[in-house]
Image (tube, rainbow, N blue to C red):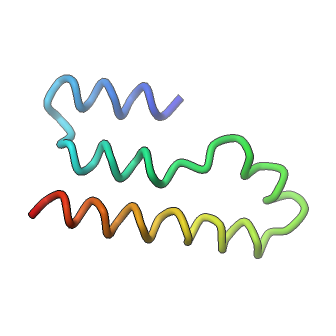
């Protein structure tokens, strides 16, 4: 799905390496769907805990 679009964008030079790495870190995959159904708050926390390191890593790689 989205990983194919991100990789294609990277190969074509549309997206930089920091964006590629950040996207790879922030992917929760299909495992998040059952958690979203059963525990919405936990799924939001799980998303937060993957997005925050992705943003920090992307910013560090941009330096």
Q: What residue lies at 77% left-to-right and 49% top-to-bottom?
A: 33
Q: What residue lies at 56% left-to-right and 71% top-to-bottom?
A: 48
Rendered location of residue 11, percent (x, y): 21, 24
Quadrant where the C terminus sits is bottom left
Q: Closer to the camera, 3 or 57?
A: 57
Q: Is residue 14 above or below residue 24?
A: above
The part of the image, by quadrant, that contains residue 52 is bottom left
The part of the image, by quadrant, that contains residue 24 is top left
- Give the residue at the far left of this rendering: 63
Q: What residue lies at 65% left-to-right and 66% top-to-bottom?
A: 46
Q: What residue lies at 61% left-to-right and 50% top-to-bottom?
A: 28
What count of labels does the image hold? Answer: 0
Q: Is residue 29 above or below residue 13?
A: below
Q: Closer to the camera, 13 or 28?
A: 28
Locate residue 25 relative to residue 16 in the image: left or right.
right
Rendered location of residue 16, percent (x, y): 17, 42
Rendered location of residue 9, percent (x, y): 26, 30
Locate residue 45 relative to residue 35 in the image: left or right.
left
Rendered location of residue 42, percent (x, y): 76, 72
Locate residue 9 relative to residue 2 in the image: left or right.
left
Q: Is residue 40 above or below residue 4?
A: below
- Give the residue at the far right of this rendering: 38
């Amino acid at each position: 799905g989205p990983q194919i679009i991100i990789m294609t964008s990277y190969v074509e030079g549309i997206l930089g390496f920091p964006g590629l790495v950040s996207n790879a870190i922030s992917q929760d995959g299909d495992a998040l769907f059952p958690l979203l159904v059963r525990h919405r708050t936990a799924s939001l926390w799980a998303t937060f805990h993957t997005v925050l390191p992705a943003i920090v890593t992307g910013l560090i790689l941009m330096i």
